[in-house]
Image (spheres, grey):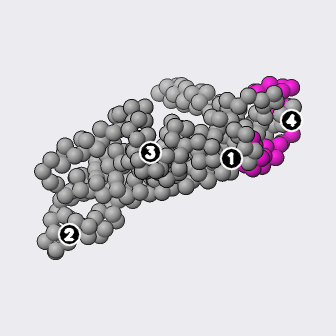
Amino acid sequence: MRSTRIAVYGLVTLLACIYLMPLLVVVLNSLRSTPDIFRNGMIGLPHGLEFSNFTEAWSGLCIAEHCTGIRGYMFNSMMMTLPATVISTFFGALLGYAISLWRFRGDMWVFGIITLGVFLPEQMKLVPWVLVLRDLGLYNTVAGLVLIHVIQGLSFTTLFCRNYYVGIPQELMKAAKIDGAGFFRIFWRIVLPLSPPILIVTVIWQFTGIWNEYLYGVTFASGDHQPVTAALIALAVTVSEAPKYGVQSAAVLIAAAPTLFVYLAGGKYFMRGLTAGAVK
């Protein structure tokens, strides 16, 4: 029994090391100078710490002929991700509540149509979104990306919230209706106070998914309006006589910092919310 446990822990540790190896290479390279990397290869320990890589990545790195670093692109991603996360989570909670606790004829059909978006590939939605954004005048704007991610996120947030809300006793709903509470009053006074576990799940899910999304950012925005993920791809394909791998690695770490912070801050609540009903 003890040998089995040792073998399992050893295997898990080995797999974790393999999985984290690319991250370790990026972290080490972000602290290395360009001559050090050219001289000793991409994989190696730093000979002296180059914290200036982060400063240059933030405000001096050249991306698509603009030598202003990733600062502006980080701002675009934040302005896109925060409102899209909040709005999609709120409406997902409202829709999940309506479908699960405020039953109406055809509610399961509505639920099926909404959650159909979970299974549709993003590529098949590109042409419809081009037409919508063009007609609304939101093409190549951060507001257009917010609209896309709100609509796209409703499928996931509604699914999560609906599966969580079906566990709320119907007796609470009946008692509230007897007391004269209506649709929105029940939502604000009863459902929302019981929702923090699943709301944390949806916020983490939406924030990380929207922040890391690339396809819509590179398709519906260009230049200074692109999110940081599109900027990193443009940085990776830039042809240069002397690529700055250390600065590029620092830029990758800066771009990944917000999602890492969100997960570390709410990771334990994320697992609690999932086990509380998000994956029923």
Q: Name the residue rendered at 34%, 34% in the picture.
A: 119
Q: Kindly state the secondary structure of the residue where label 2 is placed.
A: loop
Q: Is residue 39 left or right of residue 265?
A: right
Highlighted range, magenta: 36-62
| Residue 168, magenta (yes or no) | no
Instruction: Tell me the kind of residue under disc 1.
Output: Ile
Dividing the picture into quadrants, the one containing residue 240 is top right
| Residue 53, magenta (yes or no) | yes
Q: Where does label 3 land, which residue?
A: 134
Circle 2 crowding by C-alpha within 10 Å: few under 14, some 14–19, many from 20: few
Dividing the picture into quadrants, the one containing residue 26 is top right
Q: Where does label 2 land, which residue?
A: 182
Instruction: Tell me the kind of residue under disc 3.
Output: Arg
- Callout in the foreground (4, 2): 2
Q: How many marks?
A: 4
Q: Kindly state the secondary structure of the residue where label 1 is placed.
A: loop
Instruction: Tell me the kind of residue under disc 4.
Output: His
Q: Where does label 4 land, which residue?
A: 47
Instruction: Tell me the kind of residue under disc 2.
Output: Gly
Q: Earlier in the sequence, mark 3 or mark 4?
A: 4
Give the CA separation, mark 2 to mark 1. Answer: 48 Å
- Callout in the foreground (2, 1): 1
Give the CA separation, mark 4 to mark 1. Answer: 26 Å
Out of 143 and 208, give the one closest to the viewer: 143
Q: Are marks 2 and 1 in contact (CB under 8 Å)?
A: no
